[in-house]
Image (cartoon, rainbow, N blue to C red):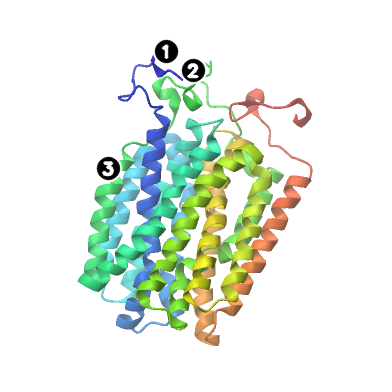
Amino acid sequence: MKISRINSSHPSPHPGIFRGWFVVAGAFTVTLVGFGSAYTFSAFLESLQRDFGASRGSASLVFSIAGFLYFGLGVVSGPLADRWGSRRLAVAGMLLVGLGLAVAGQARTLSQIYLAYGLGVGLGVGASYVPVLGAVQRWFRRRRGFASGLAVSGIGVGTLVMPPLAAFLIETLGWRHAYLALGGIAAVVGVGMALLIESDPQDRGLGPDGDPPLAQAPSAVPPGATLREATRSRRFAGLYAACLISSFGLFVPFVHLVPYALDHGVHPGSAVLLLGSIGVGSTAGRFFLGGLADRLGRQLALPLMSAGMALSLVVWAASGGFWGLAVFAFAYGVFYGGFVALLPALVMDWFGGRSISAILGVLYTSVAFGTLIGPSAAGFAFDISRSYMLPILASIGANLVAAGVLVAMSKGRKAEPPRPQGTVGNEPTPAHRR
């Protein structure tokens, strides 16, 4: 690849490096800051319960509200990114995350935490996540799974780095000043790297992977399905159902693994490291499984991720000590990371880049509803039974059902949405699928 051969009115400041990798770097940092900030919640849970006299279920609702918003908002931020560009949404989102964390540090009631953290972090991540993922999909074709996995591995690194940082700040500064410090980090680092996001390689005279751009009229829209065409297809319906079912248990460990470990006598410092183990596994899963699925097939790899999460949850159900929980956390992180990395790449494979951000936004509403219910329901179940066994078993069942739905989709008739221009993404439609 020689970018010097491509005629562009906006040459890359680093001619030897494909500009798409800078977009990936920006998306990596945005997801690191956004989701890393969200996943610090588990480190704050005990402080919030103590200072506000809250039950575990009502305190967990803070995360559930934020999760509902940052996945549900994609239905708005996705179409806005397709229209206005991903960079503007990413910058606004990082500012909201920083503001929400800072205001949470000033809260005097749990309701104010709901508003500050839930709305600030929820709206901020929601404004940025789908737009940056959509941007990365357009910059790559052959290495889409790898690039997507690398971009969202920021979530794994954020899970590794941010909760221990939050625990350190809480111990040294108190939870209120810890929120203020995290807000400053989110605003400065997040906004700075969000400026690297660009929506379309065509704007720089490039095609996906740095190839020459596809020949098309200047006014032509990118190839692929419209939002209406995609959402009316059987493939989208099956994918939506699988994501909805899986998401009821998807984020339960992110909220309740640390309290579970504390309940079983694990030292607080070690308990927070368990979230870091999820982050390490998640980073490995996003980085390696995304590239592996490019070769093995993303459609068959996705249900394997759900099945893997279910099997790792069995380890949680059988564990009470630090090392058993650490094994669970790492294994769960690997398969969770692979699932999150493969999902947007598979959507791009099936529906193309014409409305990729809007399609992802609608799809992620399924995760929003599951996230709103799952973590808080697990907390209330604990308040009643003083045990996490029921939420863990429910999460195992949800992931197995989701895997079954995805397998049925891969074996069934491949129903496609109508495709203007006879393409999906940048690939010609095979004759046997027309």
Residue 158, image quadrant: bottom left
Q: Nearer the viewer, residue 304 or 11?
A: 304
Discs 2, 3 touching: Cβ within 8 Å: no
Residue 112, given in percent of the width and then of the height, sits at: 31, 71
Q: Residue at x 40, y 67 (%)?
A: 273
Q: Is residue 336 left or right of residue 15?
A: right
Q: Is residue 68 left or right of residue 8?
A: right
Discs 1, 2 touching: Cβ within 8 Å: yes
- Sequence-first disc among 1 and 3: 1
Tag of residue 5: 1
Image vertical order of residue 11 relative to residue 263, above or below: above
Residue 290, given in percent of the width and then of the height, sits at: 55, 44
Q: Nearer the viewer, residue 136 or 370?
A: 136
Q: Residue at x 44, y 43 (%)?
A: 151
Residue 160, given in percent of the width and then of the height, sits at: 40, 59
Tag of residue 212: 2
Q: Is residue 369 left or right of residue 401?
A: left
**Label 2 crowd bin: few (<14), some (14–19), many (20+), radius 10 Å:** some
Provide the secondary structure element on which disc 3 rests: helix
Provide the secondary structure element on which disc 2 rests: loop
Q: Nearer the viewer, residue 152 or 246?
A: 152
Image vertical order of residue 361 relative to residue 270, above or below: above
Image vertical order of residue 208 relative to residue 84, above or below: above
Q: Rounded to the nearest whole Å, what is the CA distance between mark 2 and mark 3?
A: 29 Å
- Sequence-first disc among 2 and 3: 3
Residue occupied by mark 3: 192
**Label 1 crowd bin: few (<14), some (14–19), many (20+), radius 10 Å:** few
Residue 176, image quadrant: bottom left
- Sequence-first disc among 1 and 2: 1
**Nearer to us: label 1 or label 2:** 1
**Residue type at tag 2:** Pro
**Residue type at tag 3:** Gly
